[in-house]
Amino acid sequence: MNNANQILLVEDDRAIRELVSKFLVANGLRVTGVSNGRDMDRELKSRNINLVVLDMMLPGESGESICKRLRLDSKIPIVMLTAQSEEIDKVLGLELGADDYITKPFSPRELLARIRAVLRRYAVAPVQPLALRDETIVFSNWRLSTAQRQLTDAQGVRVVLTSAEFDLLLVLCAHAGQVLSRDKILDLTHGRIAGPFERSVDILVSRLRQKLESVPEDPQLIKTIRGNGYVFTGKIA
Amino acid sequence: MLKYIIWIVPRRISSQIAALIAGSVFLHLIVLSFIATFYISTVEDNPVILKQPMVVRAMMIVKMIVNTPDPTKRAELFNTIVKVVPSFRLENYKNSVAMIPKGPGEVNDKTGWTNIEVPKMQAELGTKFLVGAKTYDDTQDMITVAFEDGFAMSFLLPTEIESDIPASLQMIAVLGSFAIVLMVISIWAANRLGSPLSRLADAASKFDADQPFAAIQETGPTEVVKVARAFNEMGKRTSQLVEDRTHMIAAVSHDLRTPITRLRLRTEYVENKKTKKQMLGDLNSMNRMVQSALTYVKTTRLEPELKTVDLSSLLQSLCDDYADLDQPVIFEPHTRFPIHCDEDQIKRAVTNLIENALKFKAKVLVHLSETVQGMIDILVTDDGPGIRDDKKQSLLKPFQRGDDARGSGKNEGFGLGLSICSAIVAAHNGRITLEDAKPHGLVVRIRLPLHE
C-alpha cells in the first residue's frame, strides 16, 4: 500500500531534506523534496501527492501560512515539522489544522511512524481533523472552544486539559447521546489519545470526570455503559 | 567630640539644609530678642493702659505742664495741646480728686471711676498725682489726672487695648513667623534638590537589565540633572548591550537547531550501536541546552500573558502527561483553584522543576498549599539527593549548576532550568524558595499572589 504513497517534503535545509528523503525512500515511500511554498504549489499541481510534510520555519511564505492555505482548499494530510513542543495546540487546533506534528530534532523513524499513521487513517476514511470548524460548544456550565482548544467554566476560568483529554471530550461532545465503544473512541480521535496502555480511554474518562463533574463518583456528563463504552449525556446548547 | 558632632548632623541633604536654616534663624531670634528686651524694657512694668502711644503722648503733655509753672506760658501751652489732642481739657481739681478713689486699683461704684497706679511715672516727675479712668462711650475711656498743686486735666483714650502682648514678644512673633515661612521655603527647596536624588537612587537600585529600561525624569538642580542624564544614558547603553547579547544567544541557539537536526538524522546511518547510542545522548543534551537557552531568552523578555486559569487542573494535566510516559510524577488532587497567571509560563516553570528532579531518578510529588492568606504555594518535592544550603541561593541565578551531591552529570544543560523558573515566578510577583525534603531531597516552593 505504501509503495503508492507519494510524499511531498517542504523543508528549506538541503541536508535535512536529503537525509529525510533518503530514509523515507529506503522505507518504501516515494518522496519529492522542495524548499519553499512556490515549488510546493507547482509539485501539487503536477503530481498526485498523498501527504505533505511541512516545515514550520520556511524562508518566504511561512509554514504556518502554507498550512492554513492548504487547509482552505484541499483535504491533503499534513504533518508539520515544528521547532517547539509548545506549539502543539496551535498546530493541531483550528488555527493550522495539521493532522500531526513532530518536533525538531526528530528521529526519522518517528517521522515515518507518524506519516504511516496519518496515511492509514486517511485510507480508512478520508476524515477531516476534529477541530476544523471554529465553534464553541456549550454544555452545562462549560464552554469548549475548538479553535483555541480550551475549556472554560461559567466564570470564565480556564480549566486545563491535556491534549488527549481535549480530543476525547471533543469526540464525546460531537457524538452526544450516542454510546461510543472504546475502539470507536480511539478511531474517532485518530488514535492520538492512545497511550502505552490499553485502558487509556478509561483513564482519560476518569480524569475528565475529575475536572468536569461536580461529583466525579456520580457522573452526570459522561456516563459509563457497562460492557459497551461511554455516552455523553450533557445538554449541548 | 568630632564624632559626636558628625553623629548629630542629619544625613539627608534636605534635612541638612533645613537644619542649617533653622539654626541660623534661631540664633538671629535670640540676638534680636535680647536687643528688643533691652530697649523696650522701660515701658514693661507700667500698667497696661500707659503703654499706649496716646498715653505716652498724654504723659509727655503732663510733663510739659508740670515743667511750665509760669501761667502765661502755661496758657500758650494749653492752646497748643488742644490743637493736638482735641479731647484735652482742664478740670476742676476738687471735683476730680473727689471722684477718683484713693486706693490703687480701687473702683468707685457710684461714679464709675477707677484708680490707676503709675509709680514709675510719679518717681520720674517728682510730683504726686492721681490718675483715674472712666468709661466715656462705646469706644473711648476718659482719663483724668489730678496733680497735688491743684491742677487737673482730662482726655479721651480708645477703650480697645490694642495688644496686651509685650512688645518684645510681638517682635519675637514677627520674627518667628518669618522663621516659619523661611523654614517651609527651605524644606521645599531641599526637597526639590533631594527628591530627584532619591528618585535616582530608587531607579538605580531597581535597575534590571532584563527589563526594558525606563528613563528617569531629568529635573532638579543642574548637577542633579547632569547625574540623571548620565544615569539614563548608562541605563540605555546597558539595556542595549544586554539586548544585543540576548539576541545573539537566541540567534546562535536558533541556528544550532538545523545542524542538530541534521546530525540526529545522520545518526540513523551509524553502524556501531554503542557509538550511535552515545551520539543520540549527546544530541539530546545539545538540544536541551539550545531549548533552555531559547526558553530563558523568551521568558525573561516577555511580559506574562495573564488569564484566569484553574491551577489545580493545570498541574494535574502536567503531571498526568508525565505519568502517561511512566514517569514517577504525582499530583496530589486539590479543589479547583482559579488564579491569574500565564498558563504556558507556569507550566514551563513547573516542568523545569519536574525535569530537574527526574534527572536524579527521583520520585516527584506536586501539591498545592494555602498556608498564607492571599497566596498559593506550589510545592514540588522530590526524594533525590537535595541541594546543600550554601548552594541554594546561587542556583536560582542563570548558568549555575547543581553541586556535587546533586551531580552535574553529562546530561546537564546550561543550568538555566531553575533560573527560567525563577524569572517566571518573579514576573508573576511571586517568590521561589528551595527547602530540604525529609529524609532527603529537595522541595521547591513557588509562592504566587492571588491578586495582581
Image: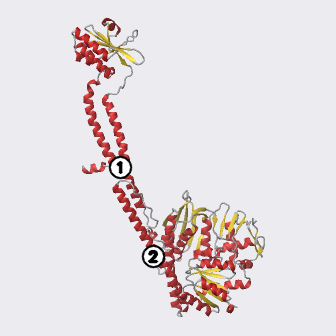
In front here: A227 or A56?
A56
Q: Residues within 10 Å of mark 2 (few under 14, many from 20)?
A: few
- Residues under labels 2 and 1: Cα distance? 46 Å
Q: Residues within 10 Å of mark 1 (few under 14, many from 20)?
A: many
State if disc 1 and disc 2 touch (CB < 8 Å).
Answer: no
The image position of residue A151, as x and y in percent, is 66, 67
Locate residue B265: give its quadrant: bottom right
N-terminal of the pair, mark 2 or mark 1, is 1
In the displayed structure, does residue B277 sit left or right of residue A117?
A: left
Q: Residue at x 69, y 81 (%)?
A: A74
- Callout 1: helix, strand or loop? helix
Residue holding disc 2: B248
Tell me if residue B301 comes above or below residue B119 in the rendering: below
Q: Which chain is disc 2 placed on?
A: B
Tell me if residue A13 comes above or below residue B388 in the rendering: below
Q: Amino acid at mark 1?
A: Ser
Locate residue A231: give its quadrant: bottom right
Indicate which disc residue B14 carries: 1
Indicate which disc residue B414 carries: none
Report whether mark 2 lies on the same chain as mark 1.
Answer: yes
Q: Amino acid at mark 2?
A: Met
The image position of residue B301, as x and y in percent, is 49, 69
- Callout 2: helix, strand or loop? helix
In front here: B380 or B102?
B102
The image position of residue B28, as x and y in percent, is 28, 38
| Quadrant in the picture for the C terminus of chain A | bottom right
Tell me if residue B248 comes above or below residue B31 in the rendering: below
| Quadrant in the picture for the N terminus of chain A | bottom right
